[in-house]
Amino acid sequence: MKETFASPNNGGEPEIGTPSRAWRARADAWDFLGYALKQLAAGSPSLRNHDGLLKQIRRSLALLDAIELYWAFPGLPAVAQLRTTVGAGEYGKGLDLVENVKTRLCGATPATEQTQISHDRNEPADNDGFPEPSEVSADRPKFEVLVVDDITEQEAEALKNDMLGQRRPADAFSYEVNVVSSFEDALVALLINPDIQACILRPGFTTRAGRLVGSDLKRFLARYLDDDLDELRPIDRILRLAEKMAELRPEVDVYLVAGVAIEGLAGSLTRRFRRIFRREDRLDLHLSLLAGIADRYETPFFTALQEYSRRPASVFHALPISRGGSVVNSPWIKDMGDFYGLNLLLAETSATSGGLDSLLDPHGSIKKAQELAARAFGADKTYFVTNGTSTANKVVHQSIVAPGDVVLVDRNCHKSHHYALMLSGAQVAYLDAYPLNQYSFYGAVPLASIKKMLLDYRRAGRLDDVKMITLTNCTFDGMVYDVERVMEECLAIKPDLVFLWDEAWFAFASFHPVFRRRTGMAAARKLDSEFRDPGYAARHAEQAKTLWDPETGEPVDDEIWLRTRLIPDPSKARLRVYATQSTHKTLTSLRQGSMIHVFDQDFEHLNGEAFREAYMTHTSTSPNYQILASLDIGRRQVELEGFALVQKQADLAVSIAQAVARNPLLRKYFRVLGARELVPAAYRQTGGSMPLGQGLSALEEAWRVDEFVVDPSRLTLDIGLTGIDGDTFKHDYLMDQYGIQVNKTSRNSVLFMTNIGTSRSSVAYLVEVLVKLAEVFDTEQRTLGPRGLRARDARVSALCSAPPALPDFSRFAERFRQDGMTPDGNLRAAYFETYKDGATEYLEPDELARRVAAGHEVVSAGFVTPYPPGFPILVPGQVITENTLAFMAALDTREVHGYDHDLGYRVFVEGHAGHPLGADPDAIHRRMATTG
């Protein structure tokens, strides 16, 4: 697989390849130039090495010619000047130029300079135009502005000089300007240059890029470059470009600068542009560029907390630790202040005034911070949660579900959902995900299974009882749903169905153009737009003719519904979508910082009060201000650099997978599982195992058409050939020996994940550690005797063979079910049945297995959750089967919640008054009817 970002075409001119690796290829090129020029300047290479270095320098410069076209700094002038300098043999001067660039690219300025490097062409330029320091402060955040207009080089230089001339020392931010000439170039620039934070569109740009675009980018951009672009009026082409930019990078501010009567355009263009200017409004444009960044940079609560901590105050309230009062003067716990720092103590307070706010009743800084978070994540409303997504899930369930409501839920979901459904009194209908028995964990729930269950409820006359569906997206192991299609087809059967997407591991996805489309909020917004399209209503009407009997008005056979890609009635469908995210898991936040995102068309009408009460129920009256502040600052980060960080996160994961696949020693013991292993062929139209490794276009195609895809930043490493189980490998090898923390394990796999904080150094360290371990395994094999080899082969065989199949949910005991036609059961009734004296007993595994084999109906009295896989194998009221017991017996895990290693399983006593053998069935049904 190619690693280069740019490669020569047949004519020798570099062309742009895979954009997801641009950041890495660019950094490597400048690093290599620094290394090579240092060698040449020192005169150390031999003649042969001298010529080889020059050849490699030319290749690096050719690569940068393709990339730097889309950056303002250092840009093409820097590459041209460096080429001239090297051609003249001035290697020392060239090295100085490269070090200047590398320092800026690392986010700092040289220690001897207190100014920002920039293109300031109003000042005399040394080095024939190479970027030199200007008199703009170095410590302010920097960004780039992209201007799209087909103008000459001289006109472009004049434009840049004019814009940069507006900058002032008092500006809060600094920017550089780059100009590209075409629609296509503008999209390429947004994809490969994450420093672009604002775009200025001017009439006159062309359609196609002047340089060759590589096959990967060409395929990806084909969906954005419509065939009719050249035929559009200039204003329509501008509007089309603005729309496509918003699809790729919605956080970027887009401005229109025109020379026509803009007053007539303003009313119809406001939604697409932050503001419209005439060309002479240079100062207003400059100030608007800064204001746009300031809007995203704003952190209302974090700033308020900082300001509060700087004010003197006397505390006659709770919290002795506030202002450090109980710490800084203590002779015994001063080390706490030394470790955490004074700012943390100064910011600890119970106050909700003085610029602060109440999380339970926000009207000031917290309210504003939540509104900004809703904007960032594409929600109508966002709520901060300071005690994790477990609590966020309970809030949503309680607000939506009343006792007796049926909720369809993935049995493989986080335990917080099971407990929330128990507390709410829901009738729970468990959905089974497809199993990955070889690796002892589940995938995701097929859409066909969801549709079938909804149709079963319709056929039983209970569809009105179904209130909500809860699914995990993405799953612990990285399986991602086609969220839009799931909601679309479900709404065709049940138009008022409420969706809860548990995106605890997926908060980062909103900041990448491919990943975003499979988030709950983005899919809801897209469906909302489609439902308002008259063409969508026409397609629904046409399909309805095939799904409903015209004479009886009844639906046709369920099999036809299952085979059809369903289109809901947009006049009836209501988009009621909730997403819970563990911000702290994948973005910047302190532990337990989470968010609830809401896109609910009936929120104020049907759920507003219930949601507020549920939020009050589960939210502490003493929320952690540091967590709230970190959520605020984390939102700022992703609105300004989320695209860069997420792109880097995914690319680094691919680099790990490629390192494992290419190293013969690593391949001997390890294998990274991809889509081919984790997603059955029935749920994939594409064939790639790791699409991003093939390019951005392959990733986009898979995420557009496949029912399930795998989050590329999650790497499931098959370790079966080592002969070591996942739990031992995690603790005894990775953590204890090398300090490497991993996400989860199964009996024969370890799950690694990259995140926005992962560095190239940490990736290199991980690969290095895997190589060292592989060398150890090799050495052990060579030194083992016949008996040791047989024992090792037996361990490998056990780990590489399929264990007992993962148990599907069996069923609820009859007394906890509503009827015999539908599968839902009352978790709460079962849970609280255990409170009755004498209702339960403990059975050791052998005795339990004997009773089950003898045909007794043994019912679980509690949740039994082994880690891994981390979901309840048994829930209260569930009938225990031989398959479940066989799976539990084969598990080799240290941690099983709800199972007592001394006493065994907690089950309901047969013959007890609450048990079906000792209770009147009519009385049971009467009691169930009034439960709640």
Image: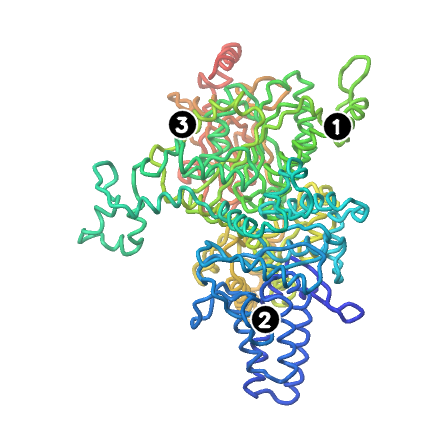
State which mark lies toward you, 2 or 3.
Answer: 2
Crowding around mark 3 (Cα neighbors within 10 Å: few <14, some 14 to 19, many 20+) is: some
Crowding around mark 2 (Cα neighbors within 10 Å: few <14, some 14 to 19, many 20+) is: many
Residue drawn 62% across the image and 44% down it: 276
Q: Name the residue under label 3.
A: 617
Q: Is residue 773 visible?
A: no
Q: Residue furthest bottom?
A: 47
Q: What residue type is labelled 3?
A: Thr
Residue 878, above or below 132: above
Q: Which comes sooner in the sequence, label 2 or label 3?
A: 2
* Labelled pair 2, 3 in contact (Cβ < 8 Å): no
Q: Which of 816 and 203 is in front in this view?
A: 203
Instruction: Tell me the CA gap for discs 2 and 3.
Output: 55 Å
Query: How far across and how far down the image is residue 495, in percent?
Result: 65, 23
Which element is circle 2 on? helix
Q: Which comes sooner in the sequence, label 1 or label 2?
A: 2
Q: Which of 163 and 70 is in front in this view?
A: 163
Q: What residue type is labelled 1?
A: Pro
Which element is circle 3 on? helix
Disc assigned to residue 234: none
Name the side, left or right, on which 568 lies relative to 715.
Answer: right
Q: Name the residue under label 1.
A: 534
Q: Which comes sooner in the sequence, label 3 or label 1?
A: 1
Residue 75, above or below 627: below
Instruction: Tell me the CA gap for discs 3 and 1.
Output: 43 Å
Q: Which amino acid does label 2 sit on?
A: Trp
Crowding around mark 1 (Cα neighbors within 10 Å: few <14, some 14 to 19, many 20+) is: few
Q: Name the residue under label 2.
A: 30
Query: How far across and how far down the image is residue 31, in percent?
Result: 57, 72
